[in-house]
Image: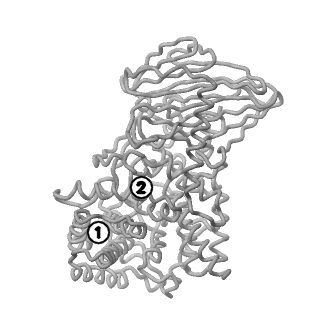
Amino acid sequence: MDRYPPIADHGLVGDLQTVALISGQGVVDWLAAPRFDSPSVFAALLDHDRGGFFRLSPDGPGHTCKQLYYPDTAVLVTRFMSPDGVGEVLDWMVPSRTPVATDRHTLMRAVRVVRGSVRFTLECRPRFDYGRAPHELELQPDAAVFRAPEGTGHLRTSFPLGREGQDVRGELTLRAGETAVAVFTVCAPGGPAPPPPTVEAVTAELWSVVDFWQAWLRTSTYRGRWPGMVNRSAITLKLLTYAPTGAPVAAATMGLPERVGGERNWDYRYTWVRDGSLSVRALLDLGFVEEATAFTHWLGDRLRDREHADGEALQIMYHVDGEPLLTEQVLGHLSGYRGSAPVRLGNAAAGQLQLDIYGEALYALSEGREVGIQAGYRGWKLVARTLDWLADSWDRPDEGIWETRGGRKDFTYSRVMCWAAFDRGLRLAAEFSRPADTVRWTRARDEILEQVMEHGWSEPDGAYVQQYGSAVLDASLLLMPRVGFLAPKDPSWLSTLDAMDRTLVSDSLVYRYDPAASSDGLRGSEGTFSLCTFLYVDALARAGRLRLARYTFEKMLTYANHVGLFAEEIGLSGEQLGNFPQAFTHLSLITAARTLDEALDRQRD
C-alpha cells in the first residue's frame, strides 16, 4: 500500500451530495460527509497516519492493479491480477433520487473473483473531523460501529471482522464466481444502523445505479469526435454538483498541492460564482438544461440574499447551500500530502474583491435564455439593480481571477468581464423588453472598452497584458474572444496569441502567468494550468488555427489519468497537481471540444 499514491491515481464515486476518492490500490483515502464541504471521515491523502482510510485489496506483492469505470457510469472497478487469480472491487454510492439534503451517506464495495482465487484484506480506519475527533468501536462478527461526537460510521460486511484497537480488519479468500460485500454508512451521531447487507441486495443496487447513470448520459446531445472524454467530463461535473441546491464545487478535495512540498494548498470544496457560471454554457452544449437551470436559480438566490445589504453585490464563493461565511484556518496536526503544508480548511479568498464575477454571472444568465432560462420580473429587477451598482463600482483595483495574495491591482481580465456584464445585460434588456437604464449601462460598457484598449495593451509586447502598466501575460485573457470583447481573428488578438505562444505555452501546456514576473504574494512555482490549456484550444479554434488547436487538444487528453480525470495542474514531468478532480478543467474540456468540433465541421463543409 502506497502511503501517498500519485494524486492522479484515483477514481471518483459519489451520490450527488458528497464524493469519495479511491486509489488504484483499492484504498478510500478521501471522504467528507454529509456533504462536499463537511469534515472528513477518511483523509489519508492529507496525512496517512492521522487522516484515516478504508482499504479493500489483496495483501502482499505479486499483483498488478488496473482501474476503470463501468461504461458510462460513476461505478468504479479496481482489478487485481496475480498468478493465483483475478479479483475486482466495485465501488459506488447511490445517487440522490430527490434533491433533499440528508445526513446519511453510503459507500458500497463489492469484491468478487473472476478467475482462480484471491485473498483480500479489509482495513477500516475512520478518523472523524479531519482526524481531530477520537471514536469508540462497537464490534460484532460482521458489523462495526464507529462512534464519535461528530458522527457515526457503520460498517457491515458479508464476512467476519476483527478488532485492531478502535479500528477493524477482515480477511477473506474468494474463488472464481464468488462475491462478498462491505457497506460503509456515515450518519449523524446516534443514527440508526442500516440493515445487514446481502450480496443479492447490493448487486441489485449496483444495477440500479448503473441504470441511473446510463439513462442520464443518454440525454446528452453531444455527437462530436471525443465522446469518451466529453461524457466522462459530464459525469464528473454531475458528481461535483450538490443536488439539493444545484451548486457545483470547484473540486472534490482540499489541501492537495500545486507543487509538492509547497504552500499553495487550498480548500476547493466550495461553489465559485465564476466556475458555476461558466459551467452553464458547457451543460447547455450537452443538452443538460435541468442542471444549468438549477445553477442559475442558485445564482439568483445569491443576488437576492444581498439585495438590501451594503457592500458588494456578490461574493466570489459560497458554501454549497449558499452560506457566505468562509473562514480559513490551518489544520496544523495534518502533515499534508507528501509534506505539503500548511493544510488549509476554508478559503480566505472568499473575502477578496474579484470584479470579473459579475461578467460571468451575466454570461450565465444570458446563455440560458436560448433554452428558456430567464428571470421573471422580480429576478430581472435584481439583475438591473446589480448592473446599476456595477456602473459606479467597476473602476477599482481588485485581486483578480487567480486569487493572488499580492494586493489589489488593475487586472485587465476583471475589466473585460465587467464589460461582458454590461454587454449581456443590454442584450437581455433588449431581447425581453425589460426596464433598464440602458444609457448608463452603455456608457459604462464603452468606457471599459476604451480603457482596456488604452491601458491593457502593451505596444512593445504586441499583446493584451495581465494588469495595466505591466508586460506580464495572463491566460485568463484567452476568454476575450469567447465573450465577444474582441473578434477571434482581430489582428491585436492574433498578436496576443502569438505572444502567449512564446511565453506561457510549454509543449502545448499553458501556464496561468509567470509568478516570478508578477508577484502573487506566495512562495514557489506551480505547474501548467489545465483549464488554461483548454481555453487555449478554444481560442486557437476560433482564430482558425485548427491544425494547432486539434493537436494541442489531443496532446492534452494524454495527460488525463487512467479513468479520464484531471486535477488542477500538470507538473514538469507530466504528473497531476492540485485538487482533484477539478470541475473547471472538465467544463473547459467540454467547451473546447464543442468549439473544435464546430470549427472542424465548417472546414469540412
Q: Amino acid at mark 1?
A: Pro
Seen at 66% across and 35% down, the residue is: 25
Q: Position of residue 363 (x, y in %)?
A: 38, 69
Residue lying at 64% horizontally and 69% vertically, measured from the top left:
552
Disc 2 marks a residue whose amino acid type is Leu
Whether residue 605 is visible: yes
Q: Residues within 10 Å of mark 1 (few under 14, many from 20)?
A: some
- All told, the count of numbered labels is 2
Q: Which residue is mark 1?
A: 397
Q: Nearer the viewer, mark 2 or mark 1?
A: 1
Q: Secondary structure at mark 1?
A: loop
Q: At x 28% / y 49%, what residue is drawn?
A: 324
Q: Quadrant of the C terminus?
A: bottom right
Q: Nearer the viewer, residue 88 or 555?
A: 88
Which of pointers 2 and 1 lies earlier in the amino acid sequence?
A: 1
Residue 99: % across, % down: 40, 43
Residue 431, numbered circle: none
The residue nearer to you, when weighing 594 against 484, is 594
Q: Report x, y in % for residue 236.
A: 54, 50
Q: Residue at x 19, y 60 (%)?
A: 311
Vertical placement of residue 359 versus 604, above or below: above
Residue 473 visible in the snapshot: no
The reply, left or right, for residue 393 in relation to residue 480 is left
Is 346 above or below relative to 569? above
**Residue 173 x/y as whole percent:** 73, 20
Residue 522, disc = 2
Measure how far apart labels 2 and 1 are at the Cα level. 19 Å
